[in-house]
Image: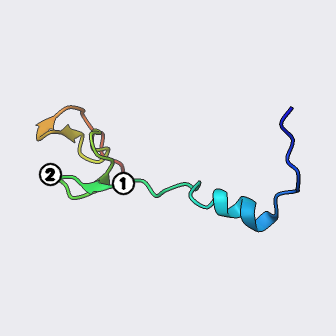
Amino acid sequence: MAVPKKRVSKQRKRKRRGDVRAEAATLVRCAKCGDYRMPHRVCRSCGTYGGQQVLEVEEEL
């Protein structure tokens, strides 16, 4: 059975886990309205995707 001979220090453990973190989402500007959206997704504010109207968006009061 594989058992560590010595305890792993906090510093050594944290060095290994240094790259495991959440990254900020990638955002691009919509070509039609200029709002930020995720790539390869329909724009929530104007309802376009790839230069074509895909969704009908209701205007807020």
Which quadrant holds residue 12?
bottom right
The residue to which callout 2 is attached is 32
Q: Is residue 41 left or right of residue 21?
A: left
Percent across and percent down for residue 49 are 19, 38
Q: Nearer the viewer, residue 46 or 23?
A: 23
Q: How is the image coloured?
A: rainbow
Give the foreground label among 2 and 1: 1
Q: Nearer the viewer, residue 61 or 44?
A: 44
Q: Nearer the viewer, residue 55 or 28?
A: 28
| Residue pictured at 70% horizontal, 62% vertical | 14
Name the kind of residue labelled 1 in the image.
Thr
The quarter of the rendered structure image containing the N terminus is: top right
Percent across and percent down for residue 26 are 36, 54
The residue to which callout 1 is attached is 26
Vertically, is 54 above or below 40? above
Please tell me whether mark 1 sits on a helix, a strand or a loop: loop
Vertically, is 38 above or below 19? above
Query: Farthest residue toward the left?
Result: 51
| Residue pictured at 28% horizontal, 45% vertical | 39
Please tell me whether mark 2 sits on a helix, a strand or a loop: loop
Which quadrant holds residue 22?
bottom right
The crowding category of the residue bearing disc 2, from other C-alpha atoms within 10 Å (few below 14, some 14 to 19, many at least 20), is some
